[in-house]
Amino acid sequence: MEFDEVRTWVIFYLISFVVLLLALFFTTQGVMLGVGLTLVIVVIAINFLIVRAEIKRIHEKKEMLRKFTQKEEKVAEPEEEKYLI
């Protein structure tokens, strides 16, 4: 993970933490219990979707790198045969 991506994740989780604190404040007031619980559900859903997208992106990157290495191995094989003759 690159440094820019780490900073993005830190900012994202700080914002999530602030929203959860706001939701806690709403639920302790009693009047806005529905708003607080809705905020909690929204934060959890967004976290799930972002982590799922990140896992998918990493998987696609590994698959792409695997395809590149297979192509390099196929190109390298004929060169080795020249020296054997």
Image: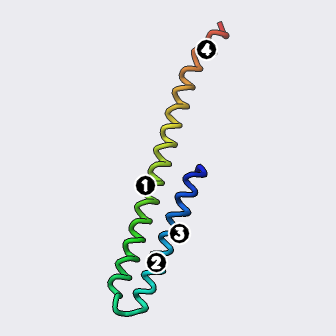
Q: Position of residue 29 (x, y in %)?
A: 40, 92
Instruction: Tell me the SS state at disc 4.
Output: helix
The color scheme shown is rainbow
Ranked by sequence position, the earlier of labels 2 and 1 is 2
> 60 or 30, which is in the foreground?
30
Instruction: Tell me the SS state at disc 1.
Output: helix
> 32 or 1, which is in the foreground?
32
Ranked by sequence position, the earlier of labels 4 and 2 is 2
The residue lying at 52 percent from left, 43 percent from top is: 62
Ranked by sequence position, the earlier of labels 3 and 2 is 3
Q: CA distance from mark 3 to mark 4?
A: 54 Å
- The 10 Å Cα crowd at callout 2, few under 14, some 14 to 19, many 20 or more, is many
The mark closer to the camera, 3 or 4, is: 3
Please give the residue where the numbered disc 1 appears in the rendered image.
Answer: 53
Please give the residue where the numbered disc 2 appears in the rendered image.
Answer: 20
Instruction: Tell me the SS state at disc 3.
Output: helix
Please give the residue where the numbered disc 4 appears in the rendered image.
Answer: 79
> 28 or 84, which is in the foreground?
28
Instruction: Tell me the SS state at disc 2.
Output: helix
How many numbered dots are placed on residues in this image?
A: 4
The residue lying at 57 percent from left, 57 percent from top is: 7
Ranked by sequence position, the earlier of labels 3 and 4 is 3
Specify the amino acid type for callout 2: Leu
**C-beta proximity under 8 Å, tags 2 and 1:** no
Specify the amino acid type for callout 4: Glu
Q: CA distance from mark 1 to mark 4?
A: 40 Å
Which quarter of the figure is the C terminus placed in?
Answer: top right
**C-beta proximity under 8 Å, tags 3 and 2:** no
Please give the residue where the numbered disc 3 appears in the rendered image.
Answer: 14
